[in-house]
Image: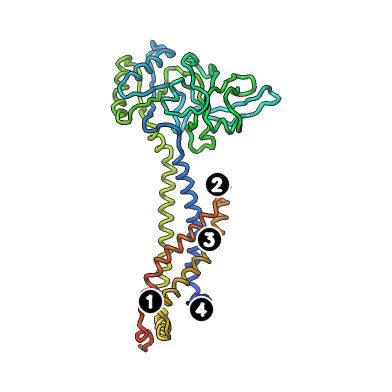
Amino acid sequence: MFQVKPIISMLMRNKSGPLLLLIQIILSVAIVANASFIISERIGMMSRESGIVEAEVFDFTIYNFDENIEAETQPLQDLDIIRQLDGVKGATLTSMTPLSGGGWSSNFSYGSSEEDSKSAPNAAIYYSDEQFIPTLGLNLIEGRNFYPDEINAGGPELASLAIVSAQFAKDTFGDESALGRVMYRGNIGQQPMTIIGVVEKLQSAWVDNDNLELSIILNVKLTSSFNRLLVRADENAIVGLKEAIPAALHKENPNRVVRGFTTISEHRTSIYRNHELMASVLSLMVVLLLLITSLGLAGMVMFNIERRTKQIGTRRALGAKKRDIVSFFLVENYLLCLIGGGLGGLIAVQLGQQLMTLYSLPKLELIYPIITVAGLLVLTTVAVILPARKAAKISPAIATRSV
């Protein structure tokens, strides 16, 4: 077994090479640890469940430009037409589409009087009817859905009942039940709304918002000349419905524009595209950095083999076994990786602090620098062991003869 002291002595004789490699290892660990953390965080964001049967639900918009169309009754007739089409499981009017990047939100308050008024967190607002929950495939875990006769058609001021997401209920009322609680849109006394149900999960339109899981469904159909609809259908029927729905609506009244037809899955892909791109670019950078560092160590070993040929041969002549020669270079590699990894880990933590401050990222977990160093040890072992085994095969007679 080779001692550490002679290995350090060898490294110090030619300081420039090991020093440059040490700097490379330090930078690689610092960058790779934070990049891996960001990749993990982005993947975690993209894998969050929306609570919706995304592959079965799509949205589209209808713009009625015929002045003779009744804004309040026409959307209801359109829903009846769509629900009768083959493959349709449900259809509803909505004020916004989940994961679409745009929609409605508001602040709420609750309490028995202005003196004990409390603010509820900002939440996304879905104005819709009793078909909203089955159309999106939401899981109602507490309370009940709206009754058909409880749905008002008109403006937002008509909302009186609410169904909230479980996360909104928890963030607002803690461990207390949300059922029967009264919220106000604005100050206490302004537009009271009673909570009658809680759905397990319903995400909003904005995936970069901290309030993504906070949503409220209100009992109002917003009817106007411009309407957004959500439709749930068999997956294999969606392509055909993209042609059948405009045809059926134009048959009833041609003076309208029907457009959109985007599934929730497609909305998810679109809104997370930047996150996916970032994760892909960072993954490529991580692979390249680890590869370059491994090749750098392998190159240094190969250079040292050429430079230490006589020394290796002398050791072999004095009885050193092949495994001793291999161990020498592996220990040399481990020393550089551990020293560089330790320093790189400290820099990684400091870099993580800066990223947390500048870009509101979560705090870097120590497991990422540790895993980075461990992965670097494995990769460099593979990179070093091949040239080290070549060095172990040097013949003592050839290495020690004079030229």
The residue positioned farthest toward the top in the image shown: 68
Q: Residue at x 40, y 53 (%)?
A: 284
Q: Give the mark nearest the N terminus, 1 or 2.
A: 2
Q: Which residue is mark 1?
A: 391
> Is residue 62 shown to the viewer in this render?
yes
The residue positioned farthest toward the right in the image shown: 115
Tell me which corner region of the image, top left, top right, bottom left or bottom right, holds residue 401: bottom left
CB atoms at circles 4 and 1 under 8 Å apart?
no
- Residue in the foreground of this view, choosing between 64 and 97: 97
Q: Name the element at disc 3.
A: helix
CB atoms at circles 4 and 3 under 8 Å apart?
no
Q: Residue at x 42, y 54 (%)?
A: 285
Spatial CA distance of label 1 from label 2 is 46 Å
Amino acid type, residue under disc 2 in the picture: Pro
Amino acid type, residue under disc 1 in the picture: Ala
Amino acid type, residue under disc 3 in the picture: Gly
Amino acid type, residue under disc 4 in the picture: Pro
> Is residue 12 shown to the viewer in this render?
no
Q: Give the mark nearest the N terminus, 4 or 1.
A: 4
Q: Give the mark nearest the N terminus, 2 or 4.
A: 4
Q: Which residue is mark 3?
A: 344
Q: Which residue is mark 2?
A: 362
Spatial CA distance of label 4 from label 3 is 25 Å
Q: Give the mark nearest the N terminus, 4 or 3.
A: 4
